[in-house]
Amino acid sequence: TAAFVLPILEQVSKPGRGGGPRAIILVPTRELAVQVKDEFEKLAHGSGIHCVAVYGGKPLKDIYAEEWLAIEQELDQDAERLAGFVAELVQLGAKSVDLQEGLVAFSSERNGRPILLSWKYDEPRVAYWYEVDQGPAQRRLLEGRTHEGLEGPVFNRIEARFDEKV
């Protein structure tokens, strides 16, 4: 900055110059205009020469205002959709929902024993189960497409809902 400010200061400080603007420095960004003005004022200190930064455009906070608003609206819609999905899972009989893992468990029975059916977000249907006293780490694949041995209206409702989606 000093490389072009010092020659300007030398020229505008010569006697016989009239008032008004005597030099214009063009820079590509608002930030650079402010930086050049600050440096100019430091170098011109005590000379009686003043510098003004003039720039156009919108204030930085307004440049992305529309984009921020759109992002906020999209996040609000996503939050509403997620709440709707969780409500639907609860309505289907979900007993536990782990949103971080994308894991849902539903109560059911297998051969007269209470079990938990298990589904993860990337699985096309409920295809795993585990014992009530175990955790999802012990999930086991359900045998066969008919899932023989599974009983209860909850399982039938879950399977019917997955068939609708797939």
Image: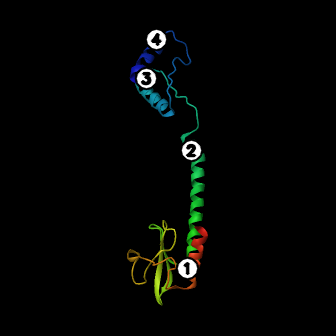
First reached walking from the N terminus: tag 1 or tag 2: 2
Residue at 50% over, 76% down = 145
Please, what secondary structure does the residue beneath circle 3 have?
A: helix
Compute the Cα span from label 4 to label 3.
Answer: 14 Å
Q: Mark 2 belongs to which amino acid?
A: Tyr
Q: Mark 1 belongs to which amino acid?
A: Gly
Mark 3 touching mark 2, by CB under 8 A? no
**Vertical placement of 37 versus 133: above or below?**
above
First reached walking from the N terminus: tag 4 or tag 3: 4
What x and y, as percent, mark residue 53? 52, 28
The residue that label 3 is drawn on is 44
What x and y, as percent, mark residue 140? 41, 77
Compute the Cα span from label 3 to label 1.
Answer: 76 Å
**How many numbered dots are placed on residues in this image?**
4
Please, what secondary structure does the residue beneath circle 2 have?
A: loop
Q: Mark 3 belongs to which amino acid?
A: Ala
Residue at 60% over, 60% down = 77
First reached walking from the N terminus: tag 3 or tag 2: 3
The residue that label 1 is drawn on is 93
Residue at 42% over, 20% down = 4
Please, what secondary structure does the residue beneath circle 1 have?
A: loop
Res 14 label: 4
First reached walking from the N terminus: tag 3 or tag 1: 3
What x and y, as percent, mark residue 121? 49, 67
Mark 3 touching mark 1, by CB under 8 A? no
